[in-house]
Every structure is written in structure tokens, then in C-alpha cells.
């Protein structure tokens, strides 16, 4: 899939893309993504998205560290060869394992933060009711996220969830060093909540959500998945799964940050 990037780019009509380049990983190997030189144009993002899957290229808004905007995307600070295929993983098993790893302590603070579940993994949340078209909603989210710091990236991926594994993103390194695991969960969220991967930073991830939870009960189950997926969203954010659940009721976008 990565080896086809050059061929996929060359198949685009002339003058489709602004100036940019294919970026090679620092540790060698074929380029896993194309990166624009100038800030991303939301309209071009939407046009490229509408060409998918015909073009075989999925667009992303890519941003760097505030202290060094060349990391990771300009510098190619990625390791696609080290990532597994999302198909090798079961999302429910991954989330259960991560939940267990985040709730092993008997400390009162941990139990309070994960109430009403405590240390008991509640299982996957039921699918949401889709109120928006996932791809069209992704286009809208790009309009809010794009700024002078974001560049357009094009990734040879069949679905948006797979882009992180394809590019070899290492943002959640302190949680999991395998973006294939992250992509496996995102595949499940694509199916159940109509998410699309919209923006990716050094250690941040932004998703559009066409079928978010509409009730607090449903949001609690989804919040448990988010806690397992990205504990920092709770530990360094809302403070508890219950408080976090209140924040995501009806929200058409989800954002994650790993410390």
C-alpha cells in the first residue's frame, strides 16, 4: 500500500495538488505520505476526500509540535515498518487490556475516576444513531481545524482509520507503540459511530463523529472506551469517566492527547 504512493499521486489530474513532497521515514523505507508545503486548504481537503476511494489517497490535516513544527511530519519522524496491520487486532480485546492497565491500582482516586465501573471493564458501547453523513461531517470539521499550522497530508489508505498505521505515527508511544492497535480501535469506531480521522498532530488526534452518544448512559459506555484508548483525556482533563461522559453527549467531534 505504501509502495503505491508515487503511482497514486501520478494518477491525479495535472495541477490537482499544490507544491509539496513525499516524505521518507527517518529510519528509511518508502515514503508513506505526501505533505503540502503551504498550510492546508479546507476546500482541497474536501475535494481529495470526495475522490476517495477512487484515488486511493486519504487526506489528513497534519500539524507539528508548537515548539518545533517540523516534528513529526516535515522531518519524517515516523516508523511505518514498526507498525502492525489493524486486521491483526480485536478492538474489544485491546480496549479491555488497556482498561485493565489503567485500573490496576486499588487507590481510592482510581476507583472514583472510573465510577460507576470501577475496575470492571464494561465492554464495547452499542453503536450510535447516525444523524450526519460521516464524510460530509468530516469536511465540516476540517473547516474548523485548519489554520496556518496545519498542512495537507495524503496517505495511501483504504479507510481513514488505517492512516495512522500506514504513516507509522508514534503519538501514543507512552500508551502503545503500535499505531496498528490504534487503527484497529478506530476501525471499530468507524463502524459504530461513523468517525473519520481528520487531524493528526505530534501526539494529538482529531476525529469527526457522525453518530455520537445522545444520552448520558450511552455516553458513559463510550467514555469508558475513550479512557482505555487515551487515559490522559480523563486524568489530565475531565478528571473522571462520568464527568468526561457529560462532555461528549451529542458532540460531533472527539479529540485525544497523549502525554
Image: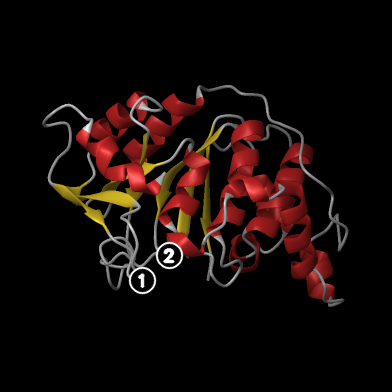
Across and down, in percent, residue 195 comes to: 55, 36
- Numbered disc 1: secondary structure: loop
- Tally of numbered tags: 2
Across and down, in percent, residue 58 comes to: 38, 38
Disc sitting over residue 196 in the figure: none
Task: Give the residue pinned by disc 1.
Answer: 27
Across and down, in percent, residue 226 comes to: 66, 52
- Numbered disc 2: secondary structure: loop
Q: Residue at x 68, y 30 (%)?
A: 128
Give residue 46's quadrant in the image.
top left
Is there a contact, CB below 8 Å, between mark 2 and mark 1?
Answer: yes
Disc sitting over residue 79 in the figure: 2
Which residue is nearer to you in this view: 132 or 242?
132
Q: Answer above or below: position of 105 versus 122.
A: below
Q: Residues within 10 Å of mark 1 (few under 14, many from 20)?
A: few
Give residue 119's quadrant in the image.
bottom right
Image quarter in which the N terminus is found: top left
Q: Residues within 10 Å of mark 2 (few under 14, many from 20)?
A: many
Position of 152 with respect to 213 (left or right) is left
Q: Residue at x 80, y 65 (%)?
A: 100
Q: Earlier in the sequence, mark 2 or mark 1?
A: 1
Q: Residue at x 59, y 35 (%)?
A: 190
Q: Answer above or below: position of 70 versus 92.
A: below
Position of 41 with respect to 60 (left or right) is left
Q: Answer above or below: position of 137 versus 86.
A: above
Q: Residue at x 38, y 42 (%)?
A: 156
Which residue is nearer to you in this view: 245 or 139?
139
Amino acid at each position: 500500500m505504501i509502495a503505491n504512493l508515487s503511482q497514486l499521486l501520478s494518477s491525479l489530474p495535472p495541477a490537482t495538488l499544490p507544491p509539496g513532497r513525499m516524505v521518507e521515514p527517518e529510519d528509511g523505507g518508502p515514503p508513506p505520505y505526501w505533505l503540502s508545503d503551504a498550510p492546508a486548504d479546507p476546500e482541497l481537503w474536501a475535494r481529495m476526500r470526495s475522490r476517495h476511494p477512487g484515488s486511493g489517497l486519504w487526506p489528513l490535516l497534519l500539524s507539528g509540535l508548537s515548539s518545533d513544527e517540523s516534528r513529526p511530519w516535515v522531518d519524517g519522524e515516523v516508523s511505518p515498518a514498526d507498525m502492525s496491520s489493524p486486521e491483526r487486532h480485536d478492538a474489544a480485546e485491546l480496549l479491555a487490556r488497556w482498561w485493565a492497565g489503567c485500573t490496576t491500582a486499588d487507590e481510592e482516586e482510581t476507583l472514583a475516576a472510573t465510577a460507576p465501573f470501577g475496575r470492571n471493564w464494561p465492554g464495547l458501547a452499542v453503536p450510535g444513531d447516525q444523524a450526519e453523513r460521516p464524510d460530509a461531517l468530516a469536511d465540516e470539521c476540517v473547516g474548523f481545524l485548519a489554520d496556518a499550522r496545519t498542512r495537507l497530508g495524503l496517505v495511501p489508505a483504504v479507510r481513514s482509520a488505517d492512516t495512522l498505521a500506514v504513516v507509522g505515527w508514534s503519538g501514543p508511544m507512552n500508551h502503545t507503540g503500535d499505531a496498528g492497535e490504534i487503527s484497529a480501535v478506530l476501525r471499530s469506531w468507524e463502524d459504530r459511530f461513523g468517525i473519520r480521522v481528520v487531524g493528526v498532530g505530534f501526539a494529538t488526534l482529531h476525529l469527526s463523529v457522525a453518530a455520537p452518544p445522545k444520552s448520558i448512559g450511552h455516553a458513559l459506555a463510550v467514555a469508558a472506551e475513550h479512557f482505555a484508548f487515551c487515559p490522559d483525556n480523563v486524568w489530565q482533563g475531565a478528571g473522571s469517566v462520568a464527568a468526561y461522559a457529560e462532555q461528549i453527549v451529542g458532540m460531533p467531534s472527539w479529540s485525544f492527547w497523549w502525554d
